[in-house]
């Protein structure tokens, strides 16, 4: 079975920030989890390099759009391995191979009769690269996202007959209530749809930084038509000499932020219908990471630098924090203080200390040898169904809920240490059997939560699995006590040293 997950492609008008890291890590968690389950996975991310926002940013800096795109695309690409993100391909929309496939699909849409030449007049946000409807305009005739005055634009454009797809899209939403998640975002997309669709600009005639329109080279495609098609075009050239389209299309999940909901939930399926292509299975819309009550935004200047966060706390701490502090799918505030609190209480104490003292006690009381005894049935009952629960939650893109399910068991293991008090059993002449059972149960419980935590904290998990004498990326056998042990375990340095 194939699993194809995408992030939105990121604008290159400025450097990456924590908001970009957030979506990329989320997709990586899902991709790594599905690889654990033996699925055939393809994970795509990349950069959106055309359009007015990039051209304006380049003009302000005194460079060409190509120079700005090359500089910042390299920064986004460098962010992925720094985040330990396992994407299979990084697409750039200035890639000539993408350009050619965009033109091929858009020509098909034109040939199918879904375009026409007309004049557009309306309010436009140059940073969003979006014409705003009356109900999308903030006080003072400003953009609700960027808080800048909107521009009144009038120009001759090619149009896409979006209104033609009013009824097909209504049927889509009626027949597939899980097409957009979480439910609040489904309702938001449906409300936009029910407000009535109007035809939208397909091209811009005032700009040259974009993909030329094949049937009218004096225009370039409006950036959203170019950008949305990346999910399809990438499969044609992501692997040298191989077309992956039949293998992975349609996507299993598009992960996006809520600010681009209408483009993905309404425009995108209409574009695919017009081109005769299959629709994605699901779109999951996450909220904003907020700083001082505002969405983190390059143009607003209120960003947390993920590189600085990783330097201080480590990459896995960042990956963990993203889905503990804010429930994935909702808006939520983040801060350096929040990082410090989660790091100390949960990573260093709950998990790191559990690992350190479990391995230390096996080394001290059994010379590192794993007791070959049955595990505690009562503790095993607390882990029953955990693997299936986590899989079910991640199938619904409920990343925070899946992490909480695992963390409930991390806390349970810590309570088990206190309940059993192995240090007292070690002093009790009649406590040897109970000590063996306790240590074996702790090791097995630690293995189970560690394997399930791999998608969230892969580097930490690899280090701990090595100390446990378990195979690298131990995907199989996450059910309690079904794995079997042999050999010895080794003490480990603190996984999350106190800062």
Image (cartoon, rainbow, N blue to C red):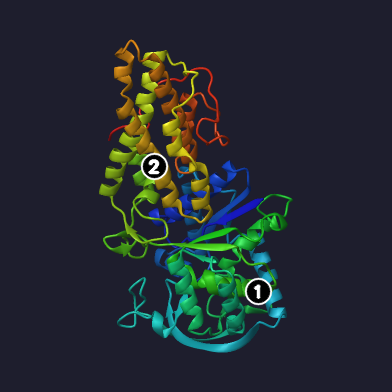
State the residue in front, 246 or 153: 246
Q: Which quadrant, please, contains the C terminus?
A: top left
Looking at the rendered image, the disc whose residue lies closer to the viewer, 1 or 2, is: 2
**Residue 120 is at least partly visible in this image:** yes
Q: In x, y percent, where is residue 114?
A: 66, 82
Residue at left 56%, top 34%?
477
Q: Nearer the viewer, residue 371 or 277?
A: 371
Q: Quadrant of residue 259?
A: bottom left
Report x, y in % for residue 128: 44, 72
Residue position marked by numbered label 1 in the rendering? 273
Q: Measured from the top left, where is residue 476 in percent x and y?
A: 58, 35
Q: What separation in Å lies between label 1 and label 2 (alpha carbons)?
A: 42 Å
The picture places residue 139, in percent across and down from the top left corner, at: 30, 81
Left or right, 452 with respect to 219, comes to: left
Rendered residue at 33%/21% (across/down):
422
Question: Mark 1 near mark 2, Cβ–Cβ under 8 Å?
Answer: no
Relative side of 49 to 41, left or right: left
Residue in the foreground of this view, choosing between 235 and 47:
235
Q: Which residue is mark 2?
A: 407
Earlier sequence position, callout 1 versus callout 2: 1
């Amino acid at each position: 079975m194939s699993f194809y997950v995408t992030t939105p492609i990121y604008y290159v008008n400025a450097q990456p920030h924590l908001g970009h890291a957030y979506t990329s890590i989320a997709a990586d968690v899902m991709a790594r989890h599905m690889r654990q389950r033996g699925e055939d996975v393809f994970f795509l991310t990349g950069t959106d390099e055309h359009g007015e926002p990039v051209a304006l940013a380049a003009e302000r800096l005194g460079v060409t759009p190509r120079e700005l795109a090359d500089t910042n695309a390299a920064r986004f690409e460098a962010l992925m391995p720094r985040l330990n993100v396992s994407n299979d391909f990084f697409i750039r929309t200035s890639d000539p191979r993408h350009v050619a496939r965009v033109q091929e699909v858009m020509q098909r849409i034109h040939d199918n009769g879904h375009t026409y030449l007309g004049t557009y007049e309306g309010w436009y946000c140059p940073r969003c690269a979006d014409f705003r409807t009356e109900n999308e305009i903030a006080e003072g005739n400003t953009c609700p996202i960027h808080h800048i005055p909107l521009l009144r634009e009038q120009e001759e454009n090619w149009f896409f007959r979006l209104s033609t797809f009013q009824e097909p899209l209504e049927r889509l939403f009626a027949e597939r209530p899980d097409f957009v998640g979480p439910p609040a975002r489904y309702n938001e997309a449906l409300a936009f749809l029910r407000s009535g669709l109007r035809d939208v600009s397909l091209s811009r005639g005032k700009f040259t930084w974009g993909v030329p329109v094949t049937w009218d080279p004096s225009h370039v495609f409006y950036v959203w038509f170019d950008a949305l098609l990346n999910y399809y075009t990438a499969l044609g050239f992501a692997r040298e000499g191989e077309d992956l389209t039949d293998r992975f299309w349609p996507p299993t999940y598009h992960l996006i932020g809520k600010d681009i909901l209408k483009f993905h939930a309404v425009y995108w399926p209409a574009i695919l219908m017009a081109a005769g292509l299959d629709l994605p299975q699901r779109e999951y819309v996450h909220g904003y990471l907020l700083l001082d009550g505002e969405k983190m935004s390059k143009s607003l200047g209120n960003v947390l630098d993920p590189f600085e966060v990783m330097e201080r706390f480590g990459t896995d701490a960042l990956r963990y924090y993203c889905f503990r502090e804010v429930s994935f799918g909702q808006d939520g505030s983040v801060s350096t203080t929040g990082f410090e609190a989660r790091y100390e209480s949960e990573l260093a104490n709950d998990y790191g200390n559990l690992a350190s003292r479990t391995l230390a006690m096996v080394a001290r009381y059994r010379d590192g040898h794993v007791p070959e005894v049955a595990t505690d049935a009562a503790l095993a009952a607390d882990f029953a169904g955990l693997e299936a629960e986590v899989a079910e939650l991640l199938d619904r893109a409920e990343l925070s809920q899946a992490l909480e399910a695992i963390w409930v068991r991390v806390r349970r293991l810590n309570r088990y240490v206190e309940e059993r008090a192995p240090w007292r059993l070690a002093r009790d002449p009649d406590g040897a059997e109970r000590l063996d059972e306790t240590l074996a149960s702790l090791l097995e419980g630690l293995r189970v939560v560690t394997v399930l935590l791999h998608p969230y904290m892969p580097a930490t998990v690899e280090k701990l699995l090595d100390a446990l004498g378990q195979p690298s990326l131990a995907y199989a056998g996450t059910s309690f006590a079904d794995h079997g042990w042999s050999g010895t375990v080794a003490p480990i340095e603190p996984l999350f040293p106190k800062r």
